[in-house]
Each structure stands twice: as structure tokens, then as C-alpha cells.
Image (cartoon, grey):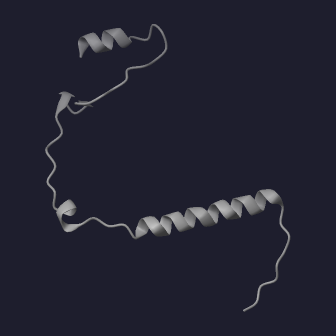
Amino acid sequence: MRYEQVSVPKEVAEFLEENRKRAQAQARQDKRHLSRSEFETVLPPIRFVISQLLPHGLHVLAGAPKVGKSWLSLVA
């Protein structure tokens, strides 16, 4: 089958090119796999600072002034 070239607006051409690149990246990603040892790895249970709410690790408590960030950190 033979296709005829057509002229398209620049925005459409850029969109189609990005879409093609995204599809190629997805195809490459689909080929990745876990090895047997990675698949069988048993991870330790998650430890929580606040039960079922805040796991151990780095967290940022941010918000507008006077909304209770200090009180939340003191109560927890």
C-alpha cells in the first residue's frame, strides 16, 4: 500500500511526533521484566509512625500560615 504525503500544520506534526515517541518509549518499557530473584524478593512490612497514616521516612509538612501545621506535628 502506498501513502501520499500531505501537509499538516506545525502543531499537528509536533503532536503526532510526540505521540510516536511516547508509543516507542512504551514499547521499550513493555520489554522490561523482573528477574526471578527480583520477583521472589520478600519485602519487610511497612512500619508506621502514625498507625496506617504516616510511614517511616522523609515527609514534608507544608501549608498556608496558621492552618495548624505545628499542632499537627505536636499531636502526632
Q: Picture coordinates of residue 14 (x, y %)?
A: 73, 59
Q: Nearer the viewer, residue 4 or 66?
A: 4
Q: Picture coordinates of residue 53 (x, y %)?
A: 26, 30
Q: Is residue 20 left or right of residue 63?
A: right
Vertical position of residue 46 compared to residue 15: above or below: above
Quadrant of residue 61 within the rendered picture: top left
Q: Is residue 9 left or right of residue 68?
A: right
Q: Picture coordinates of residue 21 (x, y %)?
A: 60, 63
Q: In the image, what residue occupies the spot 33% across and 26% down? A: 59
Q: Residue furthest top?
A: 66
Q: Is residue 56 left or right of residue 1?
A: left
Count of numbered marks = 0
Q: In the image, what residue occupies the spot 78% across and 56% down? A: 11
Q: In the image, what residue occupies the spot 77% across and 85% down? A: 3
* The C terminus - image quarter: top left
Vertical position of residue 76 compared to residue 27: above or below: above
Quadrant of residue 15 within the rendered picture: bottom right
Vertical position of residue 26 compared to residue 75: above or below: below
Q: Picture coordinates of residue 69 (x, y %)?
A: 37, 13
* The N terminus - image quarter: bottom right
Q: In the image, what residue occupies the spot 30% across and 28% down? A: 58
